[in-house]
Structures are given as C-alpha cells and as structure tokens.
Image: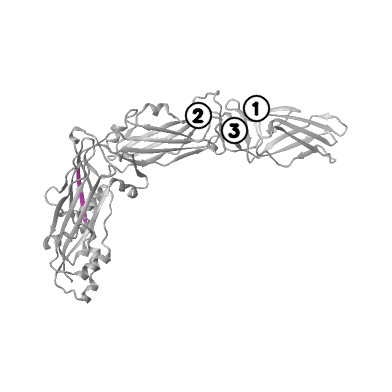
Amino acid sequence: MAEGLEPLFNSNKKLSYLALKIKKLGIPNILFSLHQRHIFLLSVIALTGLGSCLDLDKETAVGISDDPYEIALPLVNTKATVGGITEASDINSNIRIDPTGKVTVLYNGEVINGSSASIFPPFPGIEPLRMTDTFTNVEIFDPARYQIRKAIFKDTKIYFRFENNQPQDVDILLTIPELTKNGQAFTKNFKVDFKGSLPAKLITEQISVDGWSLIGKNNSLTFHYTATMEDGQVVRLDVAEMYFDVIRFAYIEGYLGHHDFVLKGSVIDIGLFDKWKSGSFDFEDPKIAIAVENTFGLPVRSRVNKMELTTITGKTVVLESPFITTGIDFAYPPLSEPGAVKTTYFTFDRTNSNIREVFNEKTKSITYDISALVNADRDTTIKGFITDNSRFSIKVAVEVPLLGSVNQVVVADTLDIDLNDFEEVEEAEFKAITTNDFPADMIIQADFLDENKQLIDRLFEGEGFKLDAATLLPGGRTVPGAEKTSFIKYDKDRFSRVKGARKLALYGRFNTTGAQDNKSLWIYTDYGIGLKMGAKIKYRKK
C-alpha cells in the first residue's frame, strides 16, 4: 500500500495474493490540477475509478470462493499545488510565477504579424520609363506620398528598348547617375544595327540591378545618353525606354508615406468563470497586455478599432481608455540600427481603463481588432527605413494576477458516469485525509442523478464536505493546512441505489478569508490541496 495509507483499514480476511494482483493491475496515485472539476473529483475518484481495478475472474482458479471478502487498498496519495497547473493548462493559457511565488494566470491571443510587403509590396514594371530627350529626369515615386533618399534593389531586372529612323547603325552610351554600385554610376553601351528597314530597333537582354542603389532626393532617375551614328552625327533617338520586370527593394530609406492597414482581429477565450453559478469575484488588477516586436525603422502606431469584453451572460462591454482613442506608439530602430528588434509593452489596467470593473463582471471572452498606422502624424521630416526582412508582431494576452477575494462563489459541473462495473461490489467504506493550504473555506457536494437528472443520492451528508481555510499569517501567506479525516460509508442498500446513477452533479462553494471586507489575498504557487484516500470494500464473486 502507498505510504501513509497502509494503516487506514484492517481487512477481516487476509488475501495476500489478491492484494498483489490488484497492485499489479496498477492502481496509481492520481495526479490532478486545480481546475474546479478536478477539485470535485478528488472526493469521488474512488467511486468512479475503482471498478476497472477489480477484474478477478482469473482468481477463482487459485482458491477464491464465492463468499464475500473484504479488501483494503489505497486509492489516492497526492497533493496538487498551483505550480502543477502549468502542465495541465489549456493551449491558450499558462501560468507565470514571480520570484516570491505569486501566481498570475495568462490567456493568450493569436499573434498578429505584419511584413514589409504590407507597406512596400513588390510591383510590376508595367509602364516604361520614357527618355523624351538625351537628358531626361523620370519620376518613379509619387512625391506627394514619398521622399526617397536611398533604395537598394533586390531581385529586380531592367531592360531597354531603342528605335532609330536613320539608315545607319547607332552607338549608345547610357548613364544613370542616381543608380550606383560600389561608388560607380550605372553606365552601359548599346548598339542599334540598321538591317535594311526602318525604324532600326533594339530590345536589350535583361540586366540585374540586385545590390544597386538609388540615391537621390527627388524620387527620380536621370537618364543621360549619347547616340552617335556611323557618320559621327549625334542624334536623339525616336524611342528610348527602360522597363522593370518587377520592383523590389532590399532596403529603402526616407519618408515612406502614410499607411493604414487593418490587421487580423482575434478572440481570447477566458475560462476562469465557466463554472460560475453565484457569488462575486474581485480580482484586484486584471490586465490586457500588448507586446510588440518591431524591426520597421519608422513610426508605427496601433489603432484599436475594437476591444470588447463579453460576459458569461452574453453581455458585451466596450473597454474604455484614453489609449483606445490616441493609439499606442511602437518603439522602432533608428537609421543606425537596421535589423534591430525594438520591443514595446503596454497594458490596459485599472489605472488607465475600466478593465477591473468589466472583467469582474465575469468575462468569458475578449474580442479585439487592431490597425497599424505607419507615419500616423504624416511628419515628412522623420526619415525612416524598411528592409526586405522588416516585420512586426503583436501579441495580446489577458493577465489575471491571483490577487483578490472570492465571496460565497458557487461553481458547478455535471459529469456522465456509469457504475455498471460495480456489480460485484456489495459495500464500500472510504477514508480520506485532506489538507488545504488556501486562504479559503471550501464546501464540496456531489449528487448522483438518474437518466432524467432526478436525485438518487447525495455523496456527502448535510451541506457537503468542508475544507477549512488555512491559517493566514500577517504577511499574507498561510501556514500548511492541518489534516482532516473523514469517512464515507456505502452499505449494501445505498451502494445498490447509486449503481443506477448516470450523471454526477458537482457543486463547490468558496469563500476567501476576509472576503466580506473585500480583503485581497495572493495565491502562491506552493498552495495546494492534499488527499490521501483508502477504501475497504466487500466483494462477492458472481
């Protein structure tokens, strides 16, 4: 038997072989979390898990008769602490524990991402840049929106088209002063051959400009060409054009315009109040936390289009805060730090919003929709940058520090059960030794219901099984809870009656120390509920 449970019961008959067989069947210590359902189940786990361990068909061959036998065995020897919740938590929730052991529950929303393609997407070079004279300045960015000082091309190719109506070959020397690499301006030689018909034409091969930089202040390229015929005459070509296949940048710098793009909204599910029936909560400092990682080298401001909290009753409340109106500015790297990640943390809390009031109305979910504003103030004096790897991510989470009070809160749950496996068990007696480290009184009850949800029997006498609050010290912590011993007896008639149950309705009432005075208390990671449980059953082979 498990340590601490061996002396709980004394069997009238010694069945050493049977006890060994049951042990081999693997009656484990039962690990549990502090979710309300698991707290309830500690009281009834012996009933709902015992039948699978009593498969004794093979034992009759070694001398077990049809007479009734009493068997003493351990069922549970465990303690669940708050720190153990982490491994059993839902996908979207987890626990944060500070150095002193104080616990905060986190509910995580979907991460929202934005990339450089959101602001400067690649765009195809559909329209050519036309050289109307031998010296032509061609605008490639709208000066009303952008003031580009430097741009480095990536995965971009160009080509040229020339036409000449003179019946001679023409040599062309073309220079683009603003397009440079390693300090040298782009310069190319071309030749348009006259082949007996006019106009003489040339479409060049594609030329990669990867790594070439556009340097300038006027959002434009200057084309300077000299076209010389065989007789030495310098002419202006009838057609001179440059084409891009697609324009992409590895880096672009300057005033990059005002942009407003909507990010994907999301919903955060809050499971904290799912089983609530009555009573009040007062969490002292719930928060909606926003964490932003940003590598865009320019001002980006969030705009909260929607931040709504929905209660378990279906009521929707809008989060109110000055920052909902003004937005939240993200930190961003300066021109000297391309590639650096700047992080911004912001929280809507009780000092800047109505989050405490609306959250304690038993919030079930939070729905949000956020836009990102680039250069929200349209300040053209701010010069920023974007690289092809620039990105930002926004993570929204709900933080609930377990600091507060619970005043006569009742929670409930209903489970499906099937006790048909207990046909060979005639009577049972359970002995439980419990401890409670929490600064909260707890009363637990369980009702056995038939298929019509009519009451068959109640697990505990009176109002239920009570766990007294642990003693609270002046510093706000409790001393480890004292042991309490309890018995649950099921004689033959009572056990026969509950075998017809199809549902188990679980109820719990909780009240923290000083809740009537709204006294806030912290929950610490080492707080827990301990349970040792053993059973003495009367078994008859059928």
Q: Which residue type carries mark 1?
A: Gly
Are the residues tagged 1 and 3 within 8 Å (C-beta)? no
Residue 439 at what x, y percent from top left?
21, 41
Viewer-nearest residue: 103 or 389: 103
Q: Which residue type carries mark 3?
A: Ile
Residue 92 at what x, y percent from top left?
37, 45
Residue pictured at 26% horizontal, 57% vertical: 29
Residue 214 at what x, y percent from top left?
65, 32
* Mark 2, other Cα within 10 Å: few <14 / some 14–19 / many ≥20: many
Q: Is residue 508 magenta?
A: yes
> Disc 1 designates what residue?
216
Q: Which residue range is magenta in the image? A: 503-509
Q: Quadrant of residue 356?
A: top left
Viewer-nearest residue: 359 or 517: 517
Does 282 appear above or below 39? above
- Marks 3 and 2, the one that precedes in the sequence: 3
